[in-house]
């Protein structure tokens, strides 16, 4: 198993999940700044030209929510998703919100070219990023986050994913401390042995 990962990207959530699961994997570090994701050899694996991509014995799996579903199913002993079908669906719904809304709100800062062609439009989208991210995280804090973990008493892959996206706020001009419960959650996740091991790889 091999994970294609870029530091600073959403693929951190998949890397954390692999560590939490105790999986045996190889880590391939990509640089999206230098365009590794657009190189022919990577596009042969993932024509979408994005990270993450997880190479398994069944083929290549892409998209964070899909990977965060497959890892707990493959390593059930790690208990990274609820067993109850309703609660598991709620976890998938939370991860879908992070992917489809929270991540997209952040992406308007760097990748306005996906939605517009005019430079003036890029600037307008960038200005809107903090407002949109505040709205997203306010909803999570007030309505979606149970505590102490996203789903309640059980740590799940939702926590590593939220930790990843929450970590982008400060660089996007948002004070993360205004979300008291989520800030404390981020500290808890960052203190977990698997997460500390992952972050040590980044620092190396």
Image (tube, helix red, strand yellow):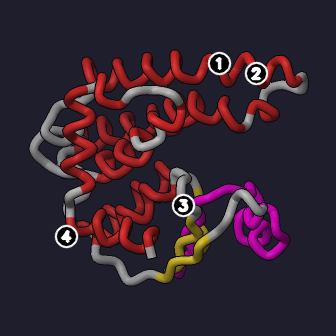
User: Sequence-wise, which precedes: disc 4 or disc 3?
Assistant: 3
Residue 119 placement (x, y as % from top left)? 87, 24
The label shown at residue 107 is none
Residue at point 19%, 49% (across, down): 188
Relative vertical location of residue 62 with respect to residue 105 in this rendering, above or below: below
Q: Which residue is disc 1 drawn over?
A: 127
Q: Which residue is disc 3 drawn over?
A: 7
Q: From mark 3 to mark 2, how far is it between C-alphas?
A: 25 Å
Nearer to us of marks 1 and 4 is 1
Which residues make up the magenta segment? 35-57
Q: Quadrant of residue 118?
A: top right
Q: From mark 1 to mark 4, how far is it between C-alphas?
A: 44 Å
Q: From mark 3 to mark 1, how far is it between C-alphas?
A: 24 Å
Q: Nearer the viewer, residue 152 or 37?
A: 37
Residue at point 45%, 35% (across, down): 170
User: Sequence-wise, which precedes: disc 3 or disc 1?
Assistant: 3
Q: Are marks 4 and 2 in contact (CB under 8 Å)?
A: no
Q: Is residue 17 left or right of residue 203?
A: left
Q: From mark 4 to mark 3, how far is it between C-alphas?
A: 28 Å
Q: Nearer the viewer, residue 1 or 31?
A: 31
Q: Quadrant of residue 145?
A: top left
Q: Which residue is disc 2 drawn over?
A: 123
User: Sequence-wise, which precedes: disc 1 or disc 4?
Assistant: 4
Residue 67 placement (x, y as % from top left)? 47, 59
User: Sequence-wise, which precedes: disc 4 or disc 2?
Assistant: 4
Residue 34 placement (x, y as % from top left)? 76, 62
Q: Is residue 74 left or right of residue 55?
A: left
Residue at point 20%, 61% (across, down): 192
Q: Residues within 10 Å of mark 3 (few under 14, many from 20)?
A: some
Q: From mark 4 to mark 2, how far is it between C-alphas?
A: 47 Å
Q: Which residue is disc 4 drawn over?
A: 77
């Amino acid at each position: 198993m091999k994970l294609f990962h870029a530091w600073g990207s959403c693929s951190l959530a998949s890397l954390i999940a692999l560590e939490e699961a105790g999986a045996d994997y190889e880590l391939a570090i990509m640089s999206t700044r230098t365009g590794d994701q657009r190189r022919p050899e990577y596009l042969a694996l993932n024509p979408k030209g994005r990270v993450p991509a997880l190479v398994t014995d069944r083929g290549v799996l892409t998209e964070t929510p899909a990977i965060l579903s497959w890892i707990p199913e493959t390593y059930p002993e790690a208990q990274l998703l609820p067993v109850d079908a309703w609660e598991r669906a709620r976890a998938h719904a939370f991860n879908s919100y992070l992917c489809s809304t929270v991540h997209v709100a952040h992406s308007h800062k760097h990748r306005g070219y996906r939605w517009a062609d005019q430079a003036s439009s890029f600037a307008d989208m960038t200005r809107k990023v903090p407002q949109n991210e505040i709205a997203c995280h306010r909803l999570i804090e007030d309505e979606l986050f149970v505590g102490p973990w996203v789903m309640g008493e059980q740590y799940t892959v939702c926590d590593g994913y939220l930790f990843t996206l929450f970590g982008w706020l400060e660089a996007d001009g948002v004070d993360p401390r205004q979300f008291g419960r989520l800030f404390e959650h981020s500290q808890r996740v960052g203190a977990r042995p698997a997460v500390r091991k992952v972050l040590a790889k980044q620092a190396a």
